[in-house]
Image (cartoon, grey):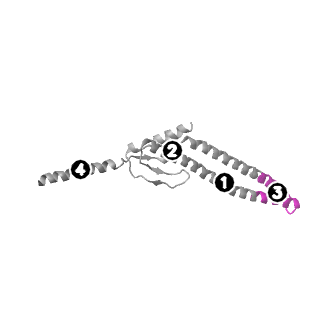
């Protein structure tokens, strides 16, 4: 009788464990190397080219002011000190120097804002792509391996170890670059 009771108890425990295991969703975890995704994303090249164009325009404005200043300095060398003409040239040069400083401040701020917007745009699209991939492929969790923006010296790791078969970076890159072609 005692052995039958023990057997029934073991069967009930086993049944409870099996039922509990069936109710637990299976975990599927993937790892993404965001550095590799960011560098391999074809959209990044297009946006970096746009930033380079903005930077080139800014440099052209600086070059124009620098050439004017050089010309004014040459005129100063040929003009007698203390004359009205000398004072006028000095005033124009000072105004140009102030204009260049203001332009430098404004341009630097504008460039940084565009650069941040550029990174935000890329990272938003990458995030949306990773989420869609995870849902479609049945992943319960996607973690980033490590991420460092090339413009910053900081990096952080979210995953200290991951089996190679959990890495879905290539799938994410393929999906990102496919959507833009």
Q: Quadrant of the C terminus?
A: top right
Per the model, the C-alpha gap separating discs 2 and 1 is 29 Å
At label 1, counting other C-alpha atoms closer than 10 Å, the crowd grade (few under 14, some 14-19, many 20 or more) is: few
> Residue drawn 43% across and 47% down?
31
Nearest the viewer among 128 and 89 is 128
User: How many numbered tags mark residues here?
Assistant: 4
Circle 1 — which element? helix
Residue assigned mark 3 = 76
| Chain-order first, disc 1 or disc 4 | 4
Range shown magenta: 68-97
Per the model, the C-alpha gap separating discs 1 and 3 is 34 Å
Residue assigned mark 4 = 14
User: Which residue is situated farthest in the top direction here?
Assistant: 181
Residue assigned mark 1 = 110
At label 2, counting other C-alpha atoms closer than 10 Å, the crowd grade (few under 14, some 14-19, many 20 or more) is: some
Circle 2 — which element? helix
Q: Quadrant of residue 69?
A: bottom right
């Amino acid at each position: 009788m005692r052995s039958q009771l023990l057997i029934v108890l073991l069967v009930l425990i086993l049944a409870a464990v099996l039922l509990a295991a069936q109710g637990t969703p299976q975990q599927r975890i993937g790892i993404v190397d965001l550095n590799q995704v960011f560098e391999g994303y074809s959209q990044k090249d297009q946006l970096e080219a746009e930033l380079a164009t903005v930077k080139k325009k800014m440099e052209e404005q600086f070059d124009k002011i620098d050439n004017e200043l050089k010309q004014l300095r040459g005129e100063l060398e040929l003009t007698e000190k203390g004359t009205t003409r000398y004072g006028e040239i000095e005033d124009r040069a000072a105004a140009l120097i102030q204009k260049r400083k203001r332009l430098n401040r404004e341009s630097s701020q504008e460039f940084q804002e565009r650069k941040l917007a550029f990174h935000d745009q890329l990272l938003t699209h990458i995030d949306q792509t990773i989420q869609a991939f995870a849902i479609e492929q049945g992943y319960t969790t996607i973690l980033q391996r490590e991420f460092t923006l090339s413009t910053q010296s900081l990096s952080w790791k979210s995953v200290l170890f991951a089996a190679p078969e959990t890495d879905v970076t290539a799938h994410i890159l393929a999906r990102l670059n496919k959507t833009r072609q």
